[in-house]
């Protein structure tokens, strides 16, 4: 299994240069059956990362470009009346793919964004009273531009909470950027490449994650983190039960990627910023201002003893 993971890592690192930790978090999110939100400036490689991941995993892929005039039916599909048999026939939308790239998701209105809620949580779509299951595995990778960019709508908390992780790619270092400038276009290389693993392997790995052991002491540590987020007074809102479950599942997937069948506190610490960074905010100070310059996830780790 570790050999197969290394093959995927090697392939991804050839195309997405100098971003080993972000790639590891993407794989962790997939193995834990979560959905991924990538937030960064335009041109940083968000879309390329999603394309590369889908290619490596050998899964069918669909890109949905979110725009301000998008309707929910543009995502889920629509029922059309067919005169040949005098009945309605449902035409599936692009959401019916194993890997769905919701590109620039916060450029669409909240109404369009809400079309993803049922799909991400229940892994099904309901249209005109009929329910249609989505494929397995089902992995949503959404990208969004920072809110200060023009033409963006903030994601509602209910939508944000559906995302297992949020990561940022960031600028490449000098060495990685030099390789980027010298090598052939990465998209051309991607088109010529073959997939690394099969759908059945991915499904088997996702089942393996469930078998990773979490000792009572480890769960005590997770509960301590949760209680500190709720009761310390340093945060405006605490970690939800869903986020706590995601934290444990993320630790399991991280341990599996490391070749272990048990979770360590370090696994929880490694995934915590990506799992709760978009769910936890610092409380306001006495002057009614949010504490600036303090990362909520890092602060939570500081005040919670292992």
Image: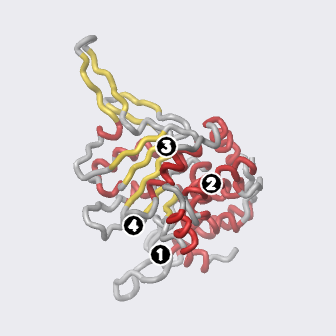
Crowding around mark 4 (Cα neighbors within 10 Å: few <14, some 14 to 19, many 20+) is some
- Reading the chain from its start, which is encountered first: label 2 or label 1? 1
Q: In this view, does 250 lie to the left or right of 230?
A: right
Dot 2 corresponds to which residue?
249
Badge 3 element = strand
Q: Of discs 2 and 4, which sits in the foreground?
A: 4
Residue 95 locus on image (x, y percent): 41, 39
View extreme (top): residue: 85
- Reading the chain from its start, which is encountered first: label 3 or label 4? 4
Residue 138 locus on image (x, y percent): 51, 41
Dot 4 corresponds to which residue?
41
Q: How far apart are marks 2 and 1 (CA)?
A: 23 Å
Q: How far apart are marks 2 and 4 (CA)?
A: 29 Å
- Reading the chain from its start, which is encountered first: label 1 or label 3? 3
- The one nearer the camera, 255 or 67, is 67
Q: In this view, does 58 lie to the left or right of 211?
A: left
Give me the residue at 27% from left, 53% from top. 109
Numbered badge on residue 99: 3
Q: Of discs 2 and 3, which sits in the foreground?
A: 3
Q: Of discs 2 and 1, which sits in the foreground?
A: 2
- The one nearer the camera, 181 or 252, is 181
Q: Which of the colour schemes (rainbow, by chain, secondary structure, one colour) is used?
A: secondary structure
Residue contact at pointers 3 and 4, CB within 8 angstroms: no
Q: Quadrant of the C terminus?
A: bottom right
- Reading the chain from its start, which is encountered first: label 2 or label 4? 4
Residue contact at pointers 2 and 4, CB within 8 angstroms: no
Q: Of discs 1 and 3, which sits in the foreground?
A: 3
Crowding around mark 3 (Cα neighbors within 10 Å: few <14, some 14 to 19, many 20+) is many
Quarter residue 94 falls in:
top left
- The one nearer the camera, 188 or 15, is 188
């Amino acid at each position: 299994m570790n050999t197969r993971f290394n093959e995927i890592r090697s392939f991804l690192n050839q195309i997405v240069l100098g971003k080993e930790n972000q790639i590891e978090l993407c794989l962790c999110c997939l193995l834990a059956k979560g959905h991924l939100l990538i937030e960064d400036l335009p041109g940083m490689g968000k879309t390329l990362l999603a394309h590369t991941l889908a290619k490596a995993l050998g899964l069918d892929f669909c890109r949905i470009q979110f725009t301000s005039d998008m309707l929910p039916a543009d995502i889920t599909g629509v029922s059309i009346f067919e005169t040949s048999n005098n009945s309605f026939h449902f035409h599936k939308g692009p959401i019916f793919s194993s890997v769905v790239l919701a590109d620039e998701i916060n450029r669409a209105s909240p109404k369009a964004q809400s079309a993803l809620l049922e799909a991400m949580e229940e892994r099904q779509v309901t249209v005109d009273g009929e329910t249609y299951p989505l494929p397995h595995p089902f992995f949503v990778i959404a990208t969004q531009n920072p809110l200060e960019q023009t033409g963006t709508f903030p994601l509602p908390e209910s939508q944000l909470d559906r995302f297992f992780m949020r990561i940022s790619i960031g600028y490449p270092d000098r060495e990685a950027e030099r390789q980027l400038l010298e090598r052939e276009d990465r998209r051309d290389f991607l088109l010529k490449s073959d997939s690394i693993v099969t759908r059945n392997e991915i499904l088997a790995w996702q089942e393996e994650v469930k078998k990773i052991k979490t000792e009572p002491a480890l769960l005590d540590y997770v509960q301590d983190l949760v209680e500190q987020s709720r009761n310390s007074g340093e945060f405006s809102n605490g970690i939800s039960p869903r986020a706590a479950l995601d934290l444990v599942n993320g630790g399991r997937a991280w341990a599996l990627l490391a070749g272990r069948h048990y979770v360590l506190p370090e696994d929880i610490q490694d995934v915590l910023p990506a799992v709760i960074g978009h769910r936890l905010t610092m409380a306001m100070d006495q002057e009614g201002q949010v504490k600036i310059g303090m990362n909520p996830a890092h602060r939570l780790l500081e005040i919670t003893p292992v």
